[in-house]
Image (cartoon, rainbow, N blue to C red):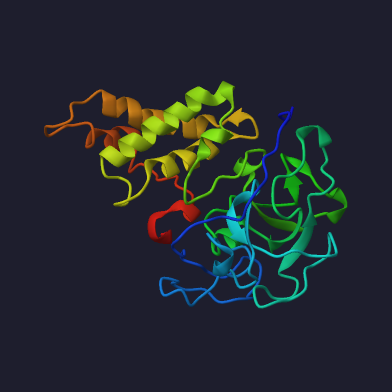
Amino acid sequence: MHRMKSTRRPLQYALGAALLLLTPACGGDGGSGGDTTGGDVKSALGGPCRTSGDCLAGVCLESEYGTPFCTRACDSAWEPCPAGDDAAEGASLCVSFDDLPNPAVGPFIGDLTQLCLPRCVSVRDCTDGNPAWEACDVPKYLGDPLYPALGNTKVCAAPSFQGKEPVDPALCDWDKTVEGQYASEANLCRSYCDYMDRCKELPQGADPECCAWGCYNRVVIEDEVQDAWHDTIKCYIETSAAYPDTGPANACTEPPKACGGSPEDPTPPAARVGGN
């Protein structure tokens, strides 16, 4: 059963300062990628962004579909988007969120409700252009197909963000996305990212709150707690707590040994320091 939504806040385009590492969008060869530290290279359709100036098409969409990504509005829903500087012909699909399969969940949150999404065959097509994508699937909202008649036409998606209010990656103000019944999972993520920060597992200058935001989106997806990720992060927290802060075997040296390798940084790409 999907979560009921009673209020929706107005949305603004993503804000931020630094450009990200931007690469071509999935499913096509439109646009060019590369290191954007000089501010000259812009992202193709589907690529990560912080401001609309980061995108070839000039639209950085902040929405509940995922972390901010480059897209553009389109006129003909369920048809291929026209070619542009940001994507080749047929590389993206015009998807409409105007008529949702379950109206009880409330309207889609986003400045655009009809937009171009990168087409794909596998999730690798998506993550090659933007590591924030999580899936390659038929167009869905909260697990339900938006337009079943499309058959096997797939687009890039990030289902863990759907149904949650968008978060500005420059602020990582993710507390507003936490529902009461998942407060313990949110606190677990805070503890995990505090451990990551304390043990210097996060990049220098990284914000643990951004880490916790990404962690929470992994642990609660479509109102279900993901046991595998939950148990993984809990192992690092509990092992760390069992050892002293200093000494040959301490709170930082032992968790990777006990938990099977280096802890993973779940920070969404759009919120990472330097876009890395």
Image vertical order of residue 199 relative to residue 15, above or below = above
Residue located at (54% from left, 68% from top): 54
Q: Is residue 133 left or right of residue 237?
A: right
Residue that protrudes farthest toward the left in the picture: 247
Residue located at (78% from left, 62% from top): 94
Pick the quarter of the image with the C terminus.
bottom left
Residue 220 x, y percent position in the rendering: 57, 33
**Residue 103: which quarter of the image?**
top right
Residue that protrudes farthest toward the right in the picture: 149
Q: Which residue occupies the foreground of this view, 8 or 136?
A: 8
**Residue 51: which quarter of the image?**
bottom right
Q: Is residue 147 left or right of residue 63?
A: right
Q: Give the total of numbered labels.
A: 0
Image vertical order of residue 238 relative to residue 218, above or below = above
Residue 210 x, y percent position in the rendering: 44, 44
Residue 36 x, y percent position in the rendering: 45, 71
Residue located at (18% from left, 26% from top): 244
Q: Is residue 223 left or right of residue 264?
A: right
Pick the quarter of the image with the N terminus.
top right
Q: Which residue occupies the foreground of this view, 63 or 137?
A: 63
Residue located at (75% from left, 71% from top): 90
Image vertical order of residue 115 relative to residue 235, above or below = below
Residue 197 x, y percent position in the rendering: 30, 41
Q: Is residue 188 left or right of residue 32?
A: left
